Amino acid sequence: MDYLKIGKATELSGKDRKLYRLLEIFPGFLSWATLLILISLSYFKPVWVAYFLIAFDVYWLLLVFYLGIHLIASYYQMKRNMKIDWEKECKKLDWQDYLHLVILPTYKEGLEILRPSFESLVRDGYPTEKMIVVLAVEERGGPDALARAEIIKEEFGPKFRNFLISVHPDGIPGEIKGKGANQAWAAKEVKAAIIDPEKLDYDKIIVSVFDIDTVVHPGYFYCLTHKFLTVKNPYRASFQPIPVYHNNIWQAPFFARVAASSNTFWQMMQQIRQEKLATYSSHSMSWRALVDIGFWSTTMVSEDSRIFWHCLLYYKGDYRVEPLNFPVSMDVCMDENMWLTMKNLYKQQRRWGWGVENIPYLLFNTVKDWKKLPKGEMINRLFVQIYGFHSWATNALIIGVIGWLPMLLGGDRFNVTVLSNNLPVVARALMTLAMAGMVLSAIISTMLLPERPPRFGFFKNITMVAQWAILPVSIILFGSFPGLEAQTRLMFGKYLGFWVTPKTR
């Protein structure tokens, strides 16, 4: 069996299935054990928890300043890259023979979402005669989805070297209904219809898979081409831009903007820490590597990150993500009213939190192929993933909720101690200093904003800054809770399907 294609424990049997289930239980068990131990010790050993909380707050403060430095560095690197004439830089290289394959999976998104994405490809500046574009439609989207695809093909098809509409059949056994299965089908279709018949060189094709709301910033494909041609062994690398959620940033509710901007900042900081970077959402890679591994998984929700882990394991650790430090714009989660937006935002964050399914995948395949993998590299990667998802689910709850429990549950055993008086004072002082991170977020987010639409007044700029006051609540409601739910579902084998975020502008 090809263990690199595994989506969940139920696809295995015997000892392999039992091992994989144990590994699926592990992330949720670790997070819940952390929280429950701290809660119980707040009653039985409140002094212990108090000292732990002070140490944790110090750690959090140092982490905020550490990540803040990375955020500032990434911001200025991105601004520098946006000013570079990448076409001029490419002309110093032998770039003319390279083609770009762009795959855009769609489900039921309207023309108001589709058109800007294709317009951005045309405006990018890269020769469109060197672009093969695939609009990947879901059969389950119905005749309206295909009709919209035909409209887009009529408007934009003649502008590109090739334009293909692929229709992913519904109900293929063993697949989940999701983006990964759709774009894998699209890749096989374009391979059979264009790439192989025309005998195109696999080594001269760079493939980008974009969420359908992705609007590329002018110069993206020149920047990508230059990076591909100047890094060491580009066939062992994926290329990651920075997702900024600007398509509807001025219209979206404040809490959705905060959540989206927080995600942008995290991705910006990861660009500086390349050893921790994995593919996310819209990204690019070589066609050669994609064919080698057999395209995207059709049984995964988190196909955008799984493609990297699949390549890392397939190439025995010889695979990486190259940061582009260049933006692509996407949609903030938004619906018809605030309550629907809150519900959809929670579901979106839970789906992102479902990326925890990669932890059992990595652990299982590392065990299976231990002798052939670089042990230091894999241990580091595993630690980063486990730590990241554990922090996602627990850190905000430790600071915002458990921090009060020694005083509430400790009773006289704690409240008569000097530490009981000092704990809130020390914690408040440390968290006040840590608020510098929130201030920095407000500043950077304001500097990143696109031009304000005329229908919004200057007061809107004030709300764009003031909205960051809800960050402490947001990281619990739209961070820890959905992250913890995803891990709990995985722990109990209640597997999530792919949930398509509704897009409204």
Image (spheres, rainbow, N blue to C red):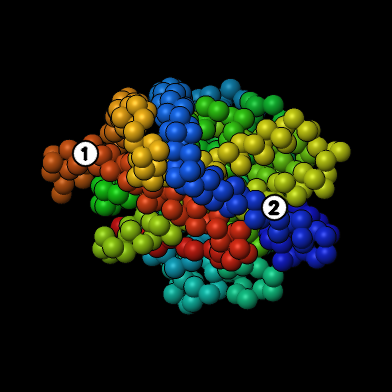
Q: Secondary structure at mark 2?
A: helix
User: Would residue 389 be found to the left or right of residue 364 on screen?
Assistant: left
Q: Is residue 47 above or below residue 247?
A: above
- Residue 270 in view of the camera: yes
Disc number at residue 466? 1
From the top left corner, tell me how far across and down residue 111 is, in percent.
38, 63
Q: Quadrant of residue 58?
A: top left
User: Would residue 91 be found to the left or right of residue 346 on screen?
Assistant: right
From the top left corner, tell me how far across and down residue 407 is, in percent.
35, 40
For the C terminus, the image quarter is bottom left
Labels 2 and 1 touching (C-beta < 8 A): no
Looking at marks 2 and 1 on the same chain, the residue that comes earlier in the sequence is marked by 2
- Name the residue rendered at 63%, 64% in the picture: 493
Disc number at residue 282? none
- Name the residue rendered at 70%, 46% in the picture: 362
Which one is in front, 44 or 318? 44
Q: Quadrant of residue 57?
A: top left
- Name the residue rendered at 71%, 55% in the picture: 22
- Residue 354 in view of the camera: no
For the N terminus, the image quarter is bottom right
Q: Secondary structure at mark 1?
A: helix
Q: Is residue 146 above or below residue 373?
A: below
Q: Which residue is mark 2?
A: 23
| Cα gap from disc 2 to disc 1, whole angstroms | 42 Å
Depth check, mark 2 against mark 1: the one in front is 2
Tell me the kind of residue under disc 1: Ala
Tell me the kind of residue under disc 2: Leu
Numbered label tally: 2
What is the crowding at mark 1: few (fewer than 14 residues within 10 Å), some, or many (at least 20)? few
Can you name the residue that lies furthest to the right here? 371
User: Would residue 280 be found to the left or right of residue 175 on screen?
Assistant: left
